[in-house]
């Protein structure tokens, strides 16, 4: 039997990796500019972490997790999202005692969900995200949203839109919950089995159902915004005023509830409107959570964060026809005019690399013309040709591949010229 990739996974081949590096470096750079620090958590955790943290009424926990027993019978799960692991680490390492609050963390790594593979969505996918834990100041909600919006702008995406909502505090959510139950209960038998199970457990999830999203009762469901108490209204108003102050446009959508149980107050999604996606596609989603740290036996500590799938962002870049710059172009291709100078070629390529210059040579015993073609295919900025005459005189022919200009340089002059080119790339 031919061994192939498991369904829902993919190989990221060398000609694609530059795009991943581009996104990862942009995300790292903007996070650190906002004073977020990287955290790396395990790929698998105890299953209970996600049952308690993500919510046992969510599709993620009930349908999509990769769960297995280890050799001692303990239930472990490949992480399906990043927030629960980061909050677990926040509690376990007592970061709530850090003098610098809030604790601002970002992450980037593989996640796993058993769902139907489709464009921009795989069973193993990569998620970048962040968490700001330890502040209930609405200005940090605006900061987190601003960071996400600025990231998308920095990679060239222009046709994006921000959707926001408020789920209110615990009191507001309880009143809204009672109204949702009263709304759906008389006709709940018209909904899928998942929605029927959620009616009394978490009726808010009915609004997020993929199966029954077009049911007329979903469209006419009571709006959470009508149940916000004064404190929740004031909080949401401040978030919107801060977004206005920094020039970020948004649309309020009272049906935006997100798919995780731990959200309250601010929730948001950033959508791509790029032609070719069809309907608007979510690139990034997140929100505020109060109570999640307590769920993991930590002190009462508020937080806010977001996550985005790298594959979907790359798809958006492709639809927008945004060309990813080559972060590591070849600076110099060293060409052997005769086979007799091969030892010198090896020595010079090594010396260039020791000086931090990206250098390459031929390994297929090509003739001079073939080496020049290979240098062109590899988009070398410069070529340097060395033959027996060059060895004798100590001067090499350096060619600028963009202009076609050629000039003679000594080996030291060659290194000086190429070091400048490396610095400019």
Image (cartoon, rainbow, N blue to C red):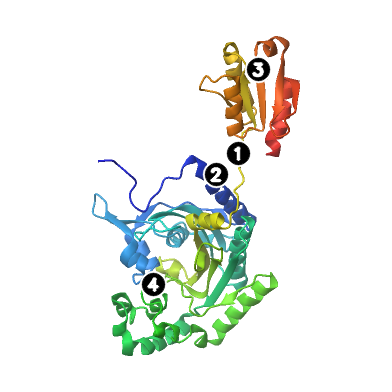
Measure the alpha-carbon separation of dots 2 and 1: 8 Å
Reply above or below: 75 against 174. above
Say whether residue 412 is left or right of residue 323. right
Question: Which sits in the foreground, 359 or 107?
Answer: 359
Q: Quadrant of the C terminus?
A: top right
Mark 3 element type:
strand
Q: Earlier in the sequence, mark 3 or mark 4?
A: 4
Measure the alpha-carbon separation of dots 1 and 3: 24 Å
Q: Earlier in the sequence, mark 4 or mark 2?
A: 2
Residue 204: quarter of image: bottom left
Reply above or below: 37 against 331. below
**Circle on res. 18:** 2
Mark 4 element type:
loop
Question: Which sits in the foreground, 387 or 275?
Answer: 275
Measure the alpha-carbon separation of dots 2 and 3: 31 Å
Asked whether residue 316 is in view, the answer is yes
Q: Earlier in the sequence, mark 4 or mark 1?
A: 4
């Amino acid at each position: 039997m031919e061994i192939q990739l498991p369904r829902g996974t993919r190989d990221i081949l060398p000609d694609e990796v530059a795009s991943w590096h581009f996104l990862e470096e942009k995300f790292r750079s903007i996070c650190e500019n906002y004073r977020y620090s990287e955290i790396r958590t395990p790929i698998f955790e105890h299953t209970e972490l996600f049952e308690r943290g993500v919510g046992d009424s969510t599709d993620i926990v009930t349908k999509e997790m990769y769960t297995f027993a280890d050799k001692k019978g303990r239930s472990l799960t490949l992480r399906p999202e990043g927030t629960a692991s980061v909050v677990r680490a926040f509690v376990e390492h007592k970061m709530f005692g850090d003098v610098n609050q809030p604790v601002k963390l970002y992450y980037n790594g593989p996640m796993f969900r058993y769902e139907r593979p489709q464009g921009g969505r795989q069973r193993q996918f990569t998620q970048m995200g962040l968490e700001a834990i330890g502040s209930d100041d609405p200005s940090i909600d605006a900061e987190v949203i601003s960071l996400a919006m600025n990231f998308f702008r920095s990679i060239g995406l222009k046709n994006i839109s921000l959707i926001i909502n408020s789920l209110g505090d615990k009191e507001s959510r309880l009143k809204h919950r009672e109204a949702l139950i009263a709304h759906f209960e008389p006709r709940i038998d018209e909904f899928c089995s998942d929605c029927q199970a959620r009616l009394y457990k978490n009726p808010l999830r009915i609004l997020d159902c993929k199966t029954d999203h077009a049911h007329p009762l979903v469209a006419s469901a009571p709006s959470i915004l009508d149940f916000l108490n004064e404190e929740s209204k004031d909080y949401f108003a401040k978030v919107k005023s801060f977004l206005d102050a920094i020039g970020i446009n948004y649309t309020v959508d009272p049906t935006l509830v997100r798919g995780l149980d731990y959200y309250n107050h601010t929730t948001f999604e950033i959508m791509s409107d790029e032609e070719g996606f069809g309907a608007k596609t979510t690139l990034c989603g997140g929100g505020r959570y109060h109570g999640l740290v307590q769920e993991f036996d930590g002190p009462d500590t508020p937080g806010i964060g977001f996550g985005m799938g790298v594959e979907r962002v790359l798809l958006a870049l492709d639809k927008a026809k945004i060309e990813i710059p080559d972060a590591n172009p070849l600076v110099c291709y060293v060409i052997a005019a005769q086979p007799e100078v091969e030892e010198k070629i090896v020595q010079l390529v090594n010396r260039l690399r020791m000086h931090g210059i990206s250098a390459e040579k031929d390994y297929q015993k090509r003739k001079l013309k073939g080496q020049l073609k290979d240098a062109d295919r590899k988009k070398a900025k410069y070529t340097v040709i060395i033959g027996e005459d060059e060895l004798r005189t100590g001067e090499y022919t350096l060619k600028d591949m963009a202009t076609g200009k050629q000039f003679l340089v000594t080996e030291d002059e060659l290194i000086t010229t190429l070091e400048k080119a490396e610095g400019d790339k």
